[in-house]
Image (cartoon, grey):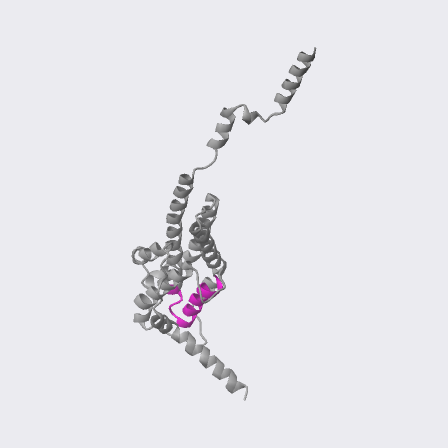
C-alpha cells in the first residue's frame, strides 16, 4: 500500500511539471518563431532603401512647390523656411535632422539651377498666385517631413517599421499629388520636368543613412535667403518709422 501511495505521489508531481521540460518538440516550435537577427537586418536594409525612395518623392513635391511659387520669391522662400524650421519634428535648429539637411540641398539646387537664373520677381508685400494652393497643402508637407524623420530615426537605431507605416506615407504622397495636380499647366509653363528633376536629386538621398555630416555651403544658402532677410529688415524699419 505504501508503494502505491508513493507511486501516486510521483504521478501527481509529474503532472505539475511544465510540459516543455518533457517535450523538446514543443520547445523547438517556440524557438522557431523567434526572428533571427539576419531577418531583422534584411528588413532594416530594405526599409532603408524604401526611406530613400520616399525622400526622393518628398523632394519632388518640394521642388514642385518652389516652381509654383517662383512668381514671387518672397512666397517661395517663406515656404522653404517652413519646411526647414516649422514642419520638422526636430526643434533643435542648430542641429537639423538628416532629412532636413538633404531637403536644404534640394532647395538650393532648385533655386540656383532653375529659379535664380530667371531673375524672378520679388514683390515686397506681394504673394504668389499659387500661394493658396500651397497653403492648403501644409498638413501634407508637415506630415511627410516629420514621418520620414521618424522612420529614419528608427532605422538608424537598427529597428524596423510596421509595413502599414509605409502604406500610410504613400497614401499621403498620393493626396499631395492629387492636390497639386490642378497646377500641372503652371508647372509645365515654368519649366518643371519631373523625371529630369528626379535624376538630378536622386544621389542626394544616398547620404540619408551616411554617418558623415553634410557640409553646408553657408555662403550660397545665405545668398538664397537674402531677399527674405532684406524684406525682414524693411519690415522692421517700416514699423519703426510708423511708430515715430
Please provide percent x and percent y for residue 158: 43, 48
Q: Quadrant of residue 188?
A: bottom left
In this view of the protein, can residue 153 be seen by the observer?
Answer: yes
In reply to whether residue 8 is colored magenta, the answer given is: no
In this view of the protein, can residue 122 be seen by the observer?
Answer: no
User: Residue at position x 54%, y 23% from top?
Assistant: 22
Please provide percent x and percent y for residue 133: 46, 62
Please state which of residues 212 and 194 is positioned toward the viewer in this rendering. 212
In the displayed structure, 11 sits above or below 31; it is above
Q: In the displayed orientation, state which residue is furthest to the front.
A: 2
Please provide percent x and percent y for residue 163: 46, 44
Please provide percent x and percent y for residue 87: 48, 61
Q: In the displayed orientation, state which residue is furthest to the top.
A: 1
Q: Quadrant of residue 179?
A: bottom left
User: Secondary structure of the magenta portion, mostly?
Assistant: helix
Which quadrant is home to the C terminus? bottom right
**Range of residues picked out in magenta:** 66-87
User: Residue at position x 45%, y 57% from top?
Assistant: 145
Please state which of residues 115 and 191 is positioned toward the viewer in this rendering. 115
In reply to whether residue 69 is colored magenta, the answer given is: yes
In the displayed structure, 88 sits above or below 22; it is below
User: Residue at position x 41%, y 68% from top?
Assistant: 76
Which quadrant is home to the N terminus? top right
Q: Is residue 101 left or right of residue 9?
A: left
Q: Quadrant of residue 19?
A: top right
Q: In the displayed orientation, state which residue is furthest to the right.
A: 1
Please state which of residues 163 and 132 is positioned toward the viewer in this rendering. 163
Please state which of residues 178 and 26 is positioned toward the viewer in this rendering. 26
Amino acid at each position: 500500500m505504501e508503494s502505491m501511495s508513493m507511486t501516486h505521489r510521483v504521478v501527481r508531481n509529474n503532472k505539475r511539471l511544465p510540459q516543455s521540460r518533457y517535450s523538446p518538440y514543443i520547445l523547438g516550435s517556440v524557438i522557431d518563431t523567434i526572428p533571427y537577427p539576419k531577418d531583422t537586418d534584411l528588413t532594416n536594409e530594405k526599409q532603408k532603401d524604401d526611406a530613400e525612395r520616399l525622400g526622393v518623392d518628398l523632394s519632388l513635391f518640394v521642388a514642385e512647390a518652389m516652381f509654383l511659387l517662383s512668381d514671387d520669391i518672397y512666397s517661395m522662400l517663406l515656404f522653404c523656411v517652413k519646411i526647414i524650421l516649422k514642419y520638422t519634428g526636430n526643434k533643435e535648429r542648430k542641429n537639423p535632422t538628416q532629412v532636413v539637411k538633404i531637403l536644404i540641398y534640394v532647395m538650393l539646387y532648385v533655386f540656383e539651377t532653375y529659379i535664380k537664373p530667371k531673375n524672378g520677381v520679388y514683390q515686397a508685400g506681394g504673394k504668389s498666385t499659387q500661394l493658396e494652393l500651397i497653403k492648403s497643402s501644409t498638413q501634407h508637407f508637415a506630415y511627410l517631413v516629420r514621418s520620414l524623420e521618424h522612420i529614419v530615426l528608427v532605422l538608424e537605431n537598427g529597428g524596423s517599421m510596421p509595413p502599414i507605416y509605409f502604406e500610410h506615407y504613400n497614401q499621403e504622397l498620393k493626396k499631395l499629388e492629387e492636390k497639386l495636380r490642378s497646377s500641372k499647366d503652371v508647372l509645365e509653363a515654368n519649366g518643371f520636368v519631373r523625371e529630369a528633376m528626379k535624376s538630378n536629386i536622386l544621389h542626394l538621398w544616398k547620404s540619408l543613412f551616411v554617418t558623415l555630416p553634410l557640409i553646408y555651403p553657408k555662403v550660397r544658402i545665405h545668398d538664397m535667403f537674402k531677399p527674405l532677410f532684406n524684406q525682414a529688415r524693411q519690415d522692421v524699419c517700416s514699423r519703426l518709422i510708423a511708430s515715430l
